[in-house]
Image: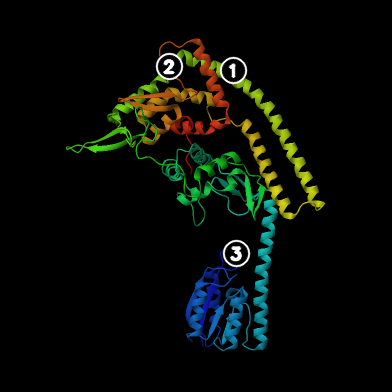
Amino acid sequence: MKYFLYCRKSSEDEDRQVLSIESQRRELERSISSWPDVEIVDVYEESFSAKRPGRPLFDEMFRRVDRGDADGLIAWHPDRLARNSVDGGRIIYSLDTARLKDLKFATFTFENNPQGKFMLSIIFGYSKYYVDSLSENVRRGNRAKIERGWLPGRAPTGYLNDRETRTIVVDPDRFPLVRTMWELMLTGSYTPRKIWEMATQEWGLRTLKRRRSGGTPPALSCVYGMFTNLFYEGVILRDGRTYPGKHQALVTLDEFDRVQELLGRPGRPRRKTHEFAFTGMIRCGECGFFVTAETKTNRYGSVYTYYHCSKRRLDYRCRQPYLPSRDLEAQLNAFLRSLSVPEPIHRWAMRRLDRSSRERASLRDTQRQSVEQAEASLERQRVNLTRLRVRDLLTDEEYARERAELDRERIRVTQRTEDLDRSYEQFEPERLLVSFSNQAASRFSKGDERIKRSILELVGSNFSLTDRQLLLEAKTPFRQWTGTAKHSDWWAFVEDVRTFAGDPANRATFARIRAILPELDQPAKAA
C-alpha cells in the first residue's frame, strides 16, 4: 500500500517539547522497517502550527490523496496531523469515503473500523482541547502580567527581556541611542527617515541578535513604529485599556504627544524638507517675500548657488539683486563669530551659573513636594472612583474611561518627579549654551547644509536680505558681543541663560545642540 510520510513541528510554545522533524523521521523510518507492504511515495516535512487550518504542505498532501497518489498516511502521533476540528474532520471523512484507507503512527495503533475512527476522533478532540486550554492559560497569564505592569512578549528596541525575573529592563547599548532618536524627532528639524539614516549609518544601531534573526539595521518602518509606540512613554495599551508600566520610560507623556503632533499621522511627518540650506528662512527686505535659491552652471561646468527674492508679488516688481551662496555664508559666519562669549565674561558667567545651579537644587526639593501632593490627590481620586463603581453609580464603560485617564495622569505626574532629578549628561544646560555660543561659527564652517540650517534656527531670527546685506537678530539667550560690553550686559546674559535653561519647554533646543556638538554628548554605538 502507498503512503505519504508526514512530519510536523510547530514553532509555537505548545510544541516545543515535541520531537524535532529530523527525530520524527528517524523514528518513523525505524518503525516502517517492521511494517510489511509499506511503500513511501513522498515525504512531507512542515514547520507550521496545526492549531488552525491552512497548512500549505498538509493541504497539498491531501490534494494528492484525493487524486489517488497514496492510500494512507504515516505520522509520529495523530496530533501531528490535526489539532483543529476542520483538519480532524477532514481526515475522518476521508476514511469514511475510502479516499484514505489506512493511517499508521509510531505511538498509536489505528485500525480502519468504527472503533478505530471513534478512538481517533477522541484523540483529535483531546488535541484541540489541549490547544484551546493552553491558549486560554496564556491569555490569562498575559492579563495578570499586564496588570502587574509588565508587557508580555518581546521587548521593543531599547529594552531587553530579563529571563530570570520575567520583566523588561533597559538595554544599556541601545537605550541611549533610541533616546537620542526621540530627542532629534522632538526638535522638529529631522524627519524619521533622516533619523533612521543617522542611527543606522553613523551610530551603528542594530537590532538585538537572536538565534535566527536580528543583528541587522532596523527597517525604516520600525522607526515609524517606534515613534508611535505607547510603551516608550511608560504605558501599556491592551484591549482598549491603559495600564501603567513598571519599566523605565524613555520619554514623558508630553514628549510623546509632541512627537505625535510633529508626525501629523504615522509615516507622514509634517515638516517640509529643503533642498538648499537657507531657503524659507530669509525674507526680502524690499517686498517681504521669502528668499529662494537656485544653481547655475557656467560654460566651464562650474556650479554656483545664488540666493535671491522669489519675486512672487504680482503688484510690485522687486529689484533686489542675486547674492552668491559663498557671500551669504561669509556674512552668517561673521554673525556667528560675534556670538562667541569673551573670555572675561565667560569666566565670570560660569561662577554665577554655578551658584544658581545650587539654588536650583533647593527649588527642586520644593517642586518635588508639590508633585508628591499631586500624586496623593490622584490616589484619593482612584479610591473614590472604585467606590463609585462598587456602588453601581458608574457603568463599566464610564469606570474604564475615568480609570484610564487617572492612570495616564498618574504616569505624567510620576514622570515629572523624575524630570526634577534628571540633568543633561556630562554638561549642565547653562554650560552647554555657552559652549555652543563659542563653537557655533566653527561648526557652521565644517557642517553640511542640515547642520548649518539647524545652527541658524537655534541662534537667529528675523532674517532679512537687502542690497546683498543680511540682517538678523540673535535669539535669547544668545547675544552679539561687539565693542566693550557693560557690566549690566554681563548680568543680563547670565539671567537669560539661567532662565532659558530652567524652562522645560526648551529641552528640544538642548537636544538639537547636543546633536550639533557630538563630542559633548556622543551616544555609544550599539554592539
Distance between the alpha carbons at the discs numbered 1 and 2 = 24 Å
The residue that appears at 58% across and 81% down in the rendered structure is 91
Distance between the alpha carbons at the discs numbered 3 and 2 = 71 Å
The residue that appears at 42% across and 21% down in the rendered structure is 339
Q: Amino acid at mark 3?
A: Arg
Does label 1 or label 3 sit earlier along the sequence? 3
In the depicted view, which residue is nearer to us: 511 or 521? 511
Q: Amino acid at mark 2?
A: Trp
Name the residue that disc number 3 marks: 16
Residue 2 placement (x, y as % from top left) = 50, 86
Residue 436 placement (x, y as % from top left) = 45, 25
**Relative to 242, residue 515 above or below:** above
Within 10 Å of the Cα at label 2, are there few (<14), some (14-19), or many (20+) other Cα atoms? some
Label disc, if present, on residue 178 of the rendered structure:
none
Name the residue that disc number 2 marks: 481
Q: Amino acid at mark 1?
A: Arg
Name the residue that disc number 1 marks: 355
Identify the element where label 2 is drawn.
loop
In the depicted view, which residue is nearer to us: 288 or 444? 288
Nearer mark to the viewer, of 1 and 3: 1
Identify the element where label 3 is drawn.
loop
Nearer mark to the viewer, of 1 and 2: 2
- Report if the CB atoms under discs 1 and 3 are less than 8 Å apart: no
